[in-house]
Image (tube, rainbow, N blue to C red):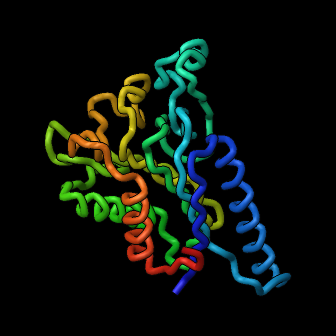
Amino acid sequence: MSEVHYHNLGLIDYKEAWDFQEKIFKATVDQKIRIRNGESNEPTMNHILFCQHPHVFTLGKSGKKEHLLLNEQKLEEMNARYYEINRGGDITYHGPGQLVVYPIFDLDHFFTDIHKYLRFLEEAVIQTLAEYDIVSGRVDGLTGVWIDSDKPTARKICALGVKSSRWVTMHGIGFNVNSDLSYFSHIVPCGINDKAVTSIKEELGREIDFNEVSSILKTKLAQQFGYTYNNK
């Protein structure tokens, strides 16, 4: 059974967390190259980062900048940042109250199938929501987790965007727990303009214990991928 190093980064600036991801990602890819070249037999390590970010909008490689509906002055007034980044997907929002999870996994420890990887991440979120008696699912052709996924009232509660190189992953999950949903009105979320966004708080009508949700998702991810944490 694979082991995963767990990092709880708390509330952390997006760029700082991105730089930390990049550092671990590069070290993992470099180690895979050394192993392949016969220069090392030390196995790669898997990591997972849990955190929240101050208000920030991020645009993936396949996104359109016009999906951000704010100019630089408005961003400054809202005390929000904007970054164009190297994950897949379009534009999304991160902010306090949203649980952000960055698995930096060497998929050679699990399976080399990026679509299956995304489905496993989604399933862990779906199972977490079930603990709150919230029924969720998927929308055909779209990533992420949705409420009323098969109805006109479909609304997104969790966005996914990942990068993979040599089967090493980075970026990941943005799961709306107690998020201020008004910030989503300033973007076309994930390039989708005909569906709403929601949060656990919005669905249940009450503030949610953020640490409790984090703990449940942490467990569900380990169960889904079949790994253990080497530091609790």
Q: Position of residue 85 (x, y in %)?
A: 62, 40
Q: In the image, what residue occupies the spot 56% across and 53% down?
A: 171
Viewer-nearest residue: 81 or 180: 180
Q: Can you say whether 84 is above or below 9 in the image? A: above
Q: In the image, what residue occupies the spot 43% across and 26% down?
A: 187
Q: Is residue 108 visible?
A: no
Side (left or right) of 229 relative to 23: left
Q: Can you say whether 96 is above or below 129 in the image? A: above
Q: Position of residue 105 (x, y in %)?
A: 58, 68
Q: Can you say whether 24 is above or below 210 in the image? A: below
Q: How many marks?
A: 0
Q: In the image, what residue occupies the spot 62% across and 41% down?
A: 14
Q: Can you say whether 45 is above or below 179 in the image? A: below
Side (left or right) of 157 relative to 52: left
Q: In the image, what residue occupies the spot 71% across and 62% down?
A: 24
Quarter of the picture holding the C terminus: bottom right
Side (left or right) of 48 relative to 153: right
Q: Is residue 225 visible?
A: yes
Q: Position of residue 47 (x, y in %)?
A: 61, 68
Residue 193 found in image quarter:
top left
Viewer-nearest residue: 155 or 150: 155
Q: Residue furthest top?
A: 73
Q: Position of residue 150 (x, y in %)?
A: 16, 47
Q: Residue furthest right?
A: 39
